Image (cartoon, rainbow, N blue to C red):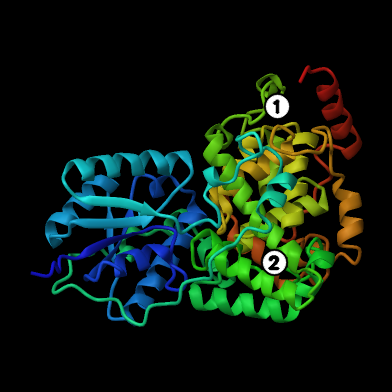
């Protein structure tokens, strides 16, 4: 007899049909496939904005699956308990999921795989989130890479398989297990009134992601290297949120970038380098998982960072009220859109950790709460890279000056005008929307006076350099 018991596809950060190795592995078994998303013990720890964004993406993906005669089953609870229930309800003996690389997900997945295997089920993960498995890229001495440039040189000529095509149908089971209703989870609740504002700036779903990629490679990628650092310009792909939640795969981006390189487009290689920068973050989180919560470099535990999240200067930083316009514009952009320009991320991180001498974990946690494109590996590496305690080949005492950076990358103050309303006769709608998104308890309005700098740039820089010079690293 032909075994027609269904296969469980445990859906996580792979909200796509195109180039989905997990889905393909399920289809290759020739049986009905039951996609299941679980709001589990790991997802429950995510910050307000990323969890809400993922929930919206999962609901949208469920609608996509229905177009192929399938559906997405939603459950909430501890992953192992829910999966055992679903396997029992459906008679499934096989389950596949996308491989994870950060310590929290690895711990969950090890427990699930060991327990389900002990129960007699066929349970395993499939590589679907990265171009290169972290353990597959080694230095000449067999170790892992600690600096990006040699990592890039090691992988830039690697053969990457062509993306998988989308399936035309997904075989359905004779009957479906019960599903919860995601709307009843109220994932927007923690967003408060900001959800309605940020929702206008989301790019949900695989179709939108692929369309954005085509637009970028057709019209913008040639100037990408030259213009990507200018926050007031629409010069980047805007695909970070889609990549974070698996609505587009890194292989698709890699091959799109290489096609643009073959066409002689100037910024194409730099775009591919940015895709590989994400790979480097996962390379590090796999080999050095302490990067998520502890200083990556030794000796930094003695550095005198402020660790008080309620410090007045930290509050001003979170609210975009530091008196430093580049920093404030960037923080407001994030609060309204759920995104922040990459150059701006470096500026606000440098300002918090160096001018304000506050711990990088404070910034890391705030980004975890506010970003729609939050990614555990990229967020951890980015904050430590900028703070000086991470994998950066540049001197740890490098301190970005946000005023000269604004003069260099926003000379006409396009970014400034887009996000700062105070003192303007006719503020932009985007700048005004910040006041509609923030908690009312902050007590701010467009008529509130724009603040003086909480710390002068000269004094903040001097204090940071003094702390560096008086510590033995």
Left or right, 122 with respect to 444, comes to left
Q: Along the line of sight, which residue is nearer the eye, 26 or 307?
A: 26
> Which numbered disc, 1 or 2, marks the residue closer to the eye?
1
Tell me if residue 72 can be seen. Answer: no
Label 1 to label 2: alpha-carbon separation:
34 Å
Q: Along the line of sight, which residue is nearer the eye, 35 or 141?
A: 141
Residue 158 image position (x, y, % from top left): 63, 58
Left or right, 36 with respect to 468, comes to left
Q: Along the line of sight, which residue is nearer the eye, 132 or 346?
A: 132
Figure quadrant of residue 241: bottom right
Badge 2 crowding class, 10 Å Cα cut-off, few under 14, some 14 to 19, many 20 or more, is some
The tally of labels here is: 2
Where does label 2 land, which residue? 432
> Is 158 above or below relative to 361?
below
Left or right, 345 with respect to 54, comes to right
Residue 237 image position (x, y, % from top left): 67, 69
Badge 1 crowding class, 10 Å Cα cut-off, few under 14, some 14 to 19, many 20 or more, is some
Picture quarter with the N terminus? bottom left
Tell me if residue 229 can be seen. Answer: yes
> Is 72 above or below relative to 52?
below
Which one is earlier in the sequence, the residue at label 1 or at label 2? 1
Disc number at residue 305? 1
Residue 201 image position (x, y, % from top left): 59, 70
User: Please, what secondary structure does the residue beneath circle 1 have?
Assistant: loop
Disc number at residue 411? none
* Residue in view at x 65 percent, y 22 percent: 301
Figure quadrant of residue 175: bottom left
> Is 41 above or below relative to 326?
above
> Is 151 above or below relative to 168?
above
């Amino acid at each position: 007899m032909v075994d027609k018991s269904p296969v469980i596809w445990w859906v996580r950060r792979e909200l796509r049909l195109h180039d989905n190795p997990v889905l393909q592995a399920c289809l290759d078994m020739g049986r009905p496939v039951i996609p299941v998303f679980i709001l589990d013990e790991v997802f429950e720890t995510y910050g307000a904005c990323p969890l809400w964004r993922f929930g919206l993406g999962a609901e949208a993906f469920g609608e996509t699956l229905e177009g192929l005669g399938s559906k997405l089953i939603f459950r909430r609870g501890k992953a192992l308990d829910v999966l055992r229930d679903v396997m029992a309800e459906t008679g499934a003996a096989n389950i596949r999921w996308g491989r994870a690389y950060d310590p929290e997900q690895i711990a969950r997945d090890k427990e699930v795989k060991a327990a389900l295997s002990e129960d007699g089920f066929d349970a395993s993960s499939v590589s679907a989130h990265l171009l290169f498995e972290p353990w597959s890229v080694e230095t000449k001495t067999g170790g892992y890479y600690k600096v990006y440039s040699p990592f890039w040189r090691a992988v830039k000529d690697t053969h990457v398989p062509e993306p998988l095509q989308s399936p035309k149908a997904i075989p359905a089971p004779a009957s479906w297990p019960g599903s919860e209703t995601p709307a009843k989870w109220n994932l927007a609740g923690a967003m408060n009134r900001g959800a309605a504002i940020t929702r206008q700036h989301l790019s949900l779903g695989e179709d939108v992601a692929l369309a954005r990629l085509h637009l970028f490679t057709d019209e913008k990628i040639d100037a990408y290297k030259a213009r990507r650092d200018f926050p007031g310009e629409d010069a980047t792909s805007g695909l970070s949120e889609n990549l974070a939640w698996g609505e587009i795969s890194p292989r698709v981006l890699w091959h799109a970038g290489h096609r643009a390189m073959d066409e002689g487009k100037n910024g194409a290689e730099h775009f591919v380098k940015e895709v590989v920068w994400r790979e480097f973050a996962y390379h590090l989180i796999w080999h050095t998982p302490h990067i998520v919560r502890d200083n990556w470099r030794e000796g930094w535990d003695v550095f005198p960072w402020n660790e008080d999240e309620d410090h007045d200067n930290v509050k001003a930083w979170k609210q975009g009220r530091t008196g430093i316009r580049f920093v404030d514009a960037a923080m407001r952009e994030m609060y309204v859109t759920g995104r922040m320009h990459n150059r701006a991320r470096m500026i606000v991180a440098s300002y918090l950790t160096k001018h304000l001498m506050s711990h990088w974990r404070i910034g890391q946690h705030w980004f975890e709460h506010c970003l729609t494109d939050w990614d555990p590996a990229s967020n951890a590496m980015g904050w430590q890279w900028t703070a000086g305690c991470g994998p950066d080949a540049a001197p740890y005492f490098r301190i970005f000056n946000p005023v000269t950076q604004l003069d260099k990358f926003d000379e006409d103050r396009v970014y400034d005008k887009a996000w700062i309303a105070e003192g303007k006769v006719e503020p932009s709608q985007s700048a005004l929307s910040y006041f509609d998104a923030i908690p009312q308890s902050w007590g701010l309005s467009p008529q509130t006076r724009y603040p003086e700098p909480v710390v002068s740039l000269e004094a903040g820089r001097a204090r940071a350099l003094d702390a560096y010079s008086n510590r033995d690293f």
